Amino acid sequence: MSTAQETDAEDPPWAEVTPEAARRLLVAAVDAFAERGYHATTTRDIAGRAGMSPAALYIHYKTKEELLHRISRIGHDRALALLESAADGGGTAAERLASAVRSFVRWHAERHTTARVVQYELDALGEEHRTEIIALRRRTDAVVRRIIGEGVASGEFDVPDVPGTTLAVLSLCIDVARWFNAQGSRTPDEVGELYAGLVLRMVGAER
Amino acid sequence: MSTAQETDAEDPPWAEVTPEAARRLLVAAVDAFAERGYHATTTRDIAGRAGMSPAALYIHYKTKEELLHRISRIGHDRALALLESAADGGGTAAERLASAVRSFVRWHAERHTTARVVQYELDALGEEHRTEIIALRRRTDAVVRRIIGEGVASGEFDVPDVPGTTLAVLSLCIDVARWFNAQGSRTPDEVGELYAGLVLRMVGAER
DNA sequence: CGTTGCCCTAAGCGCTTGCTCAGGATCGGG
DNA sequence: CCCGATCCTGAGCAAGCGCTTAGGGCAACG
């Protein structure tokens, strides 16, 4: 029972969730939400996976929705941080775009359990929490659009429709969370590399 | 109450669902599943949208899951038929690939309500029904892979990783169902055109 | 040893869920 | 006028849901 059934490796990521019992519950919730979806997951299931009674959940979280919000918030923060650090990394626009896609995709593959919850359970959030998360997603979009725009301005890229291509690039990356490990024949690094190349072609970068 | 709240235009598509009341229920279920997800939708909600009592549902369908299965089955059949007719349409590999992406994407945009259910509620299906649907999806994959393979063989395309690129192309198209109409600034035709161009670049087709 | 505060559990409340069942309305054929 | 078939409803059952409440175990501190 101590080995997580199909969780991705859990190196550092929920370290910021401070009471240790709260972290155990949150990790259990990520697994359950990713496996069956938010609405199909019961609070009893979450508590059970964390080795606690159903009532224990409500000591650390006010509602089941608050759990989803914490997961979504932390996940979006992390993904956005990855993107921004790649975008500010220096180099040509092509180098920055490739690096951004690589790390963004690698995260969605490596942590596909978390990413699935973060990306696909968005409208299970309450009104207020959802608008907060949507603001984060707009910042994600802005980062990618900026890199592509700069590449166009510098003549590196040939992109007739910058907003549309931005949308497509992000959509491609995000959907990794859905299919990854359907059959496990690719490592996250390989997918990141493949996708970086495909995206460079999409923006018409010289090879 | 007679105007569907945000449904896509309903030209022909559920004509094969024969008792008219069963069709009304199915259309209502598509709307409800797309809006709130399968698990969050109640049979009372579905029946209510169809203007019937909760019990009426069970005259036409054995369970709520059977409804999802019928929707999923018909939707996958339709999407696959579109793909195959484009793939068998003649012309160069580039023309066939562009045509396939155009119609596949257009379907996912135009009928994004249906597509959302079809593509994202897959594992709410029971064991047996799910494996049936997965077989259809493998055929979808095979169609795209074949076109790309032929393009590579004829020298039209330059694709280092055919299975990986096939996966990416399909993933890109399918994810249209998730984001389309988030803001409604693009028509399905425009998205299809945009995506056909992007995909041709991904496979390294001469322009 | 007694007290305080923290973390947890057993039990269960009020409500909703998927689904059932006995029977009513409507209609074409005799 | 009655018949059976077809399609539907009102009422409700058993199970499961999110969440609450009263209290137990235990470490830290005087």
Image (cartoon, coloured by chain):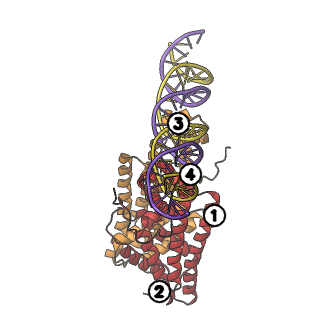
Chain colours: A red, B orange, C yellow, D purple
- Distance of label 2 from label 1 (alpha carbons): 32 Å
Marks 4, 2 in one chain? no
Circles 3 and 1 in contact, beta carbons < 8 Å: no
Q: Find numbered disc 1 in the image and state the secondary structure of the residue it sits on.
A: helix
* Label 1 to label 4: alpha-carbon separation: 17 Å
Residue B112 position in % (x across, y down): 54, 57
Circle 1: residue type: Thr
Q: Which chain is disc 4 placed on?
A: B
Residue type at mark 3? Leu
- Return the x and y of residue B161 as percentages of the image width and height: 34, 75
For marks 3 and 1, give the CA distance.
35 Å
Determine which of the numbered discs, if any, sits on residue B57 in the image.
3
Pick whichever, B42 or B74, lies toward us.
Answer: B42
Q: Chain of mark 2?
A: A
Label 4 environment density (alpha carbons within 10 Å; few <14, some 14–19, many ≥20): some
Q: Please tell me which residue is depicted at 36% across the width and 71% down the height of the picture.
A: B164
Is A18 above or below relative to A88?
above
Q: Of the residues shown, which amino acid type is indicated by label 2?
A: Glu
Give the number of the disc on residue B36: 4
- Identify the disc placed on residue A131: 1
Q: Earlier in the sequence, mark 3 or mark 4?
A: 4
Protein chain holding label 1: A
To the question of a shared chain for discs 3 and 4, the answer is: yes
Check disc 2 and report the residue beneath it. Answer: A95
Task: Classify mark 1: residues with Cα within 10 Å, few (<14), some (14-19) or many (20+).
Answer: some
Separation of disc 3 and disc 2 at Cα? Answer: 56 Å
Question: Are marks 3 and 1 in one subunit?
Answer: no
**Residue A205 against residue B12 in the figure, above or below:** below
Contact (CB < 8 A) between labels 3 and 4?
no
Residue B135 visible from this viewpoint: yes
Q: Nearer the viewer, mark 3 or mark 2?
A: 2
